[in-house]
Amino acid sequence: MLSKDEVLAVAKLARLDINEDQLVKFQKQLEDVLKLFDEVKSIDVENVKETSQVTGLKSVTREDTVKCDPSTGSGQAPSTDSTGSTNSPQADSLQASSGQATRPCDIGELLQNVPIKDGTNIVVPKVIGAKPDHTEIDSASAKEDPESSSG
Amino acid sequence: MELFQLTISEASEKLAKGELTSVDLTKSVLERIKSVDDKVKSYISVFEEGALEEAKISDERRKSGKTIGELDGIPIALKDLICVKGSETTAGSNILKGFISPYDATVTNKLKKAGVVIVGKTNQDAFAHGSSTENSDFFTTKNPWDLERIPGGSSGGSAAAVSADECIGALGTDTGGSIRQPASLCGVVGLKPTYGRVSRYGVIAMASSLDVVGPITKSVKDCAIIMEAIAGPDKLDSTTLNEPVPKYLSEMKKVSKLKVGIPKEYFAKGTDDDVLKELNKAIDVLKKAGAEIIDISLPSTDYAISLYYIIQPAEVSSNLARYDGIKYGFSTLRESPNQPLDQVYFSSRSEGFGDEAKRRIMLGSYVLSAGYYDAYYRRAMKLRTLIKNDFDEAFKKVDVILGPVSPTPAFKIGEKTDDPIQMYLSDIFTAPVNPAGVPAMSLPVGFVERDGKELPVGLQIIAPQLQEQVIFDTAFTIEQELKLDQKPQL
């Protein structure tokens, strides 16, 4: 059984507001899915290993290098030769034969979807000491996130 | 025959002989979209100008003797969760409405290098959560064979577009059946490749241990052509397999002495009788060709769907945590910039996500939370091992496994929207494949009648990891014998 409180707690964890109608609906629907899984609880998996990577790859790494110069074109149109990546021995073969930039190299282009920015910085609202003008959520989150009300 | 009806291989041959230009072909496809898409509603966006421009460039390339290959000048549609630089990528969701891709996905990049003309972006269930496109935050795509029915999902827009000749080929993604099920219900070919065979860089993530990108096409040959272009390792996706890509098309051959596994669980009760009849006709084709039919068992089939609906929402809840209203996508900050941080999270996510995304995020958050992790998520990961073992055991005895894709033909719009469990159960034969990482195709093999309308039926062909070639060979053998040439009447 999934209680209404559990549904509300999980919604809060997931940063979702749900109203009373949704609460009733989601409670039943989530419970139905969990019940589906409960039906297979009898299967013995005591000595079975978990599978998270199904093709067996392990710890795949690559050089963590900047492949383009982000300082070159803030807010400007992408420059096709700014990738600089094709000179590197690490360069992808798929990039090697193209003159077209396939990696984000232009800060302005990367930031075009940001709601609020200041120059090339993403503006993030205050975390500490934020003004509580949404009492319902604020009091709820205060219980979970002490830092949000600690200002 | 109209130009928009051509397959990739037919169009490619005509282009090579100089009987056709990419501009004419692209114009024909764009005209077709104009005349039928208000009924079918496959597309979220159509790149009319860009497509004609790319077609012109392809024709010029051909004139100067620098043509690239089979895909040069071919109009292709992409599911709207695949990034195309400089254009909108929504994943069918309100929270990404207006999101402009800052770069090309690797598959987009590879297709561009192969010379394709990108005609547009197709509709889907939001974030690929669904089996009908009814979970799209924008509109529902219709099945071209019966406009009152769903096209399947989540790649329903791509499958409907291929079926209705609104493109020559398309890409979709498959996490639990999202390429195969719509391909089956729309009567087209759809391949879910081996996990890691195709890069997912620049493709909006749903469940990262299961997601794959694959082709949806009018023929088996076309499917092989697109696979050759998009498959292969990619440094930008660490899950891609470092294996060479076979020449699927030139190595394609009819099969004779094939060992075909028929799992009893896939042919047990639950699948419509007339659907089974169509599947058996296709199996008979292989028998006649000399294949040996072997009865097998995949005991995990019974619980595969249950564990799929634990693992998948768990990964969804993690992947969708990035939509926070701060970095991109829908944000209440744009309207009221003075909110505290936590309120931005709550309000942006609550307004931006649809019900199905919320359901899966909450379910995933629950099964991953302390106290429930062992009972649900860890247990599901162990059951996943049993599923993989089942397939491994079966493939010691057989070369391919055949079964249904969907237990029924396309269902009516609205029929299952109130009951998520019923919707989830339509994935019962497709969902076991993804946790095992094996490749599988939906091949059109016949039709059944519902309410006076002919509806397509697809056969599922499953092979061991990286054995896409045997799927192509098996499908080609059946396709050449059945010669289905019906088209939906629009």
Image (cartoon, coloured by chain):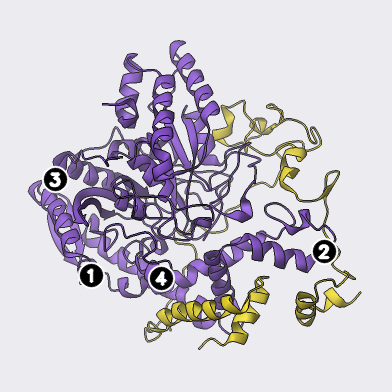
Chain colours: A yellow, B purple
Using the numbered discs, state the Cα–Cα distance from disc 4 to disc 2 in whole angstroms.
46 Å
Question: Hey, what amino acid is under mark 2?
Answer: Gln
Residue A111 image-quadrant placement: top right
| Label 3: chain letter | B
Disc 3 on helix, strand or loop?
loop
Give neighbour class at mark 3: few <14, some 14-19, many 20+ (Cα, 10 Å): some
Residue carrying label 4: B385
Label count reads 4
| Rendered location of residue A123, percent (x, y) | 83, 54
Q: Label 3, label 1: how many angstroms apart (C-alpha)? A: 23 Å
Q: Nearer the viewer, mark 2 or mark 1?
A: 2
- Residue B179, x across and y down, in percent: 39, 51
Q: Chain of mark 1?
A: B
**In this view, which residue lies farthest toward the left?**
B288
Extreme residue toward the top, this view:
B64
- Which residue has dot 2 on it? B339
Residue under numbered circle 1: B297
Q: CA distance from mark 4 to mark 3?
A: 32 Å
Chain bearing mark 4 = B
Q: CA distance from mark 4 to mark 1?
A: 16 Å
Locate residue B394, reporting x and y percent: 26, 64
Of the residues shown, which amino acid type is indicated by label 3?
Ser
Determine whether the residue tagged by mark 4 lies in a helix, strand or loop: helix
Mark sitting earlier along the chain (2/1): 1
Percent x, y for residue B295? Answer: 16, 65
Secondary structure category for the residue under label 1: loop
Select label 4 or label 1 by which is in front: 1
Which chain is home to disc 2?
B
- Regarding residue A47, the answer to whether it shows in the image is no
User: Which amino acid type is shown beneath numbered disc 1?
Assistant: Ser
